[in-house]
Image (cartoon, rainbow, N blue to C red):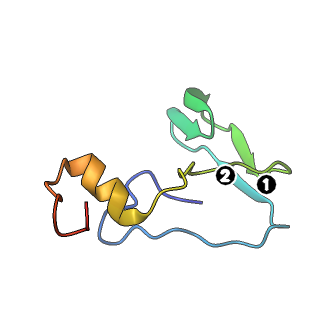
Amino acid sequence: MLPISAHALFSRPLVISPTSRIVVGIESAEALLSADALRKFPLIAKDKVLVTKNAGIINLAHLKNTSFSDRLVAKFKLPVEGWRGE
């Protein structure tokens, strides 16, 4: 689980067991849930959110079969003629 502001100084990811079941109860009058494939899902007081492991697998990155340096050259349009044997 990752907090929304994971870049903040004291916000840290929570590493849990794949078999864990976490229930988050809503105490405020209203709240918004942001989760996988959901932009905003409104919640109200006394709602509960159950967090479990998804049975599916997701790909977080799709990398092309190129070297890291080739990707840097392409991304930043670096002038590389000569020093790489080109």
Q: Position of residue 26 (x, y in %)?
A: 60, 43
Q: Is residue 8 above or below residue 35?
A: below
Q: Give the amino acid type for the residue marked by disc 1 in the picture.
A: Thr
**Residue at image coords 71%, 44%:** 49
Residue indicated by mark 1: 52
**Residue at image coords 58%, 69%:** 14
Image disc number at residue 79: none
Observer-nearest of 79 and 20: 79
- Regarding mark 2 in the picture, which secondary structure is present there? strand
Q: Earlier in the sequence, mark 1 or mark 2?
A: 2
Q: Residues within 10 Å of mark 2 (few under 14, many from 20)?
A: few
Picture quadrant of residue 72: bottom left
Q: Is residue 10 left or right of residue 27?
A: left
Q: Position of residue 50 (x, y in %)?
A: 76, 48
- Regarding mark 1 in the picture, which secondary structure is present there? loop
Cα–Cα gap, marks 1 and 2: 11 Å
Q: Give the amino acid type for the residue marked by disc 2 in the picture.
A: Val
Residue indicated by mark 2: 24
Observer-nearest of 51 and 70: 70
Q: Residues within 10 Å of mark 1 (few under 14, many from 20)?
A: some
**Residue at image coords 56%, 51%:** 61
**Residue at image coords 79%, 54%:** 52
Observer-nearest of 6 and 75: 75
Q: Is residue 20 left or right of residue 27?
A: right
Q: Is residue 16 above or below residue 8?
A: below
Q: Nearer the viewer, mark 1 or mark 2?
A: 1
Q: Is residue 15 left or right of residue 57?
A: left
Split into 4 quadrants, where in the image is the N terminus? bottom right
Q: How many marks?
A: 2
Q: Is residue 69 above or below residue 34?
A: below
Picture quadrant of residue 12: bottom left
Split into 4 quadrants, where in the image is the C terminus? bottom left
